[in-house]
Amino acid sequence: MPFSALMSIDVPQWFAAYTCAHHERRVSDHLGARGIEYFLPTYHVVRRWKDRKVELELPLFPGYVFVHVAMREHFRMVGVPGIARIVGTSLQPTPLPEYEIESLKNARSTGIHTQPYPYLEIGRKVRIKAGPFEGLQGILVRRKGKFRVVFSLQIIRSSFVLDVDGADVELIKDQRIA
């Protein structure tokens, strides 16, 4: 389907900006200073060093910042220090589905714990029935008797995992992610 059929160049969409290594915060600071809406999902982790424990806030998708702009304004992202490229084809950036970003924002605002997870392609697909991720589809995995759902953003080939209650998921019959 041609790009023009997918969206208007005047309607803001979410795009994934691929950053230089460990420059996600710097990029988001520059975007904010330019008045460009962005989203940098993070998670908390405790790291132990020889003499202390430190709680760190790290990017959920290392190397990516999500940017909300109209296609007509994508040039505003090009000159931002630390952005290597905007994810898409060689002809144009590819927008992310709005519901994926909104689900991540909802989970962040409700304090649901998430963490990065290796990108998965094969497994049993499930749909979330309740909560901020309602309607999203992911891959069901089990860890230590708990249910976990791995959500993947295919455009950036990155995933995150979320602990869920078994009652909040439903299997999508006879479908596998290929």
Image (cartoon, rainbow, N blue to C red):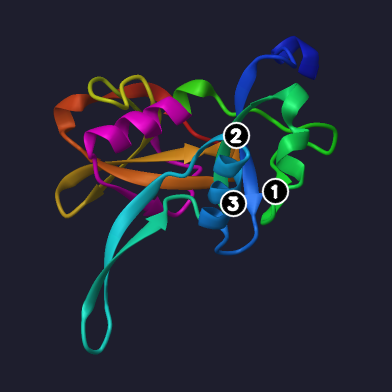
List x then y, in percent, for residue 135.
35, 19
Residue that label 1 marks:
80
Disc 3 and disc 1 in contact, CB within 8 angstroms: yes
Closest to the observer: 46 or 129? 46
Residue that label 3 marks:
27
**In what element is the residue under mark 1?**
loop
Is tag 2's residue or tag 3's residue first in the polypeptide sequence? 3
**In what element is the residue under mark 2?**
loop
Going by the numbered disc 1, the residue's amino acid type is Val
Residue 36: which disc? Answer: 2
Q: CA distance from mark 2 to mark 3?
A: 11 Å
| Residue at horizontal 28 percent and vertical 62 percent from the top | 45
| Residue at horizontal 60 percent and vertical 64 percent from the top | 21
Label 2 crowd bin: few (<14), some (14–19), many (20+), radius 10 Å: some
Placement of the C terminus among the 4 image quadrants:
top right
Is residue 59 a member of the stretch shown in magenta?
Answer: no
* Magenta segment: 101-125
Q: CA distance from mark 3 to mark 1?
A: 7 Å
Residue that sits furthest to the bottom in the current view:
50
